[in-house]
Amino acid sequence: MVNSFHIPVLTQEILNYLNLKKGGVYIDCTLGGGGHSEAILENIYPHGFLIGIDQDIEAIETAKEELKSSKKNELMYMPVILLIPVCLRY
């Protein structure tokens, strides 16, 4: 995926390093334009779960737009500002 917001780099190296498994659960803490998230989704389909986090609302909206054509997963987005308080309770 290439968009005006972000051009993902080292995608194959990242995928190799993560050693993704079908059905695995993963977190992309730098969602950005969704380029790496899209590649992760391709590798964890059909039962995987990916959480995309970014503090930039514009980045989240861009990724949402870029990834909405993906039928591989149901997508849910949350700005990191909202996610942190939830995590701190546990």
Image (tube, grey):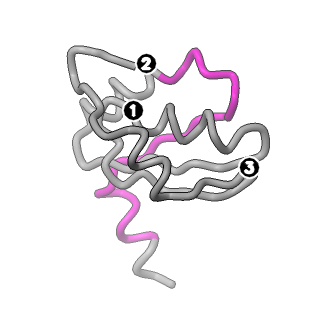
The residue at the point 60 percent across, 54 percent down is 20
Q: Is residue 25 left or right of residue 28?
A: right
Residue 52, position as x, y percentages in the image: 45, 46
Q: Is residue 2 left or right of residue 78?
A: left
Is residue 42 positioned above or below 62 on the image?
Answer: below
Residue 1, position as x, y percentages in the image: 40, 19
Span colored in magenta: 67-86
**Closest to the observer, 80 or 15:** 15
Q: Which of the marked residues, 1 or 2, is nearer the chain's N terminus?
A: 1
Is residue 42 positioned above or below 69 on the image?
Answer: below
Q: Which element is circle 3 on?
A: loop
Q: Residues within 10 Å of mark 1 (few under 14, many from 20)?
A: many
> In this rendering, which labeled residue sits more in front, label 3 or label 1?
3
Residue 73 magenta-drawn?
yes
Q: Which element is circle 1 on?
A: loop
Q: Residues within 10 Å of mark 3 (few under 14, many from 20)?
A: some
Residue 14, position as x, y percentages in the image: 40, 49
* Residue occupied by mark 3: 22
- Three-letter code, disc 3: Lys
Q: Residues within 10 Å of mark 2 (few under 14, many from 20)?
A: few
The residue at the point 25 percent across, 25 percent down is 7
Q: Is residue 20 left or right of residue 5?
A: right
* Residue occupied by mark 2: 65
- Three-letter code, disc 2: Glu
Quote the CA–CA distance across marks 3 and 2.
Answer: 24 Å
Q: Residue furthest bottom?
A: 90
The residue at the point 54 percent across, 20 percent down is 68
State the mark number for residue 34: 1
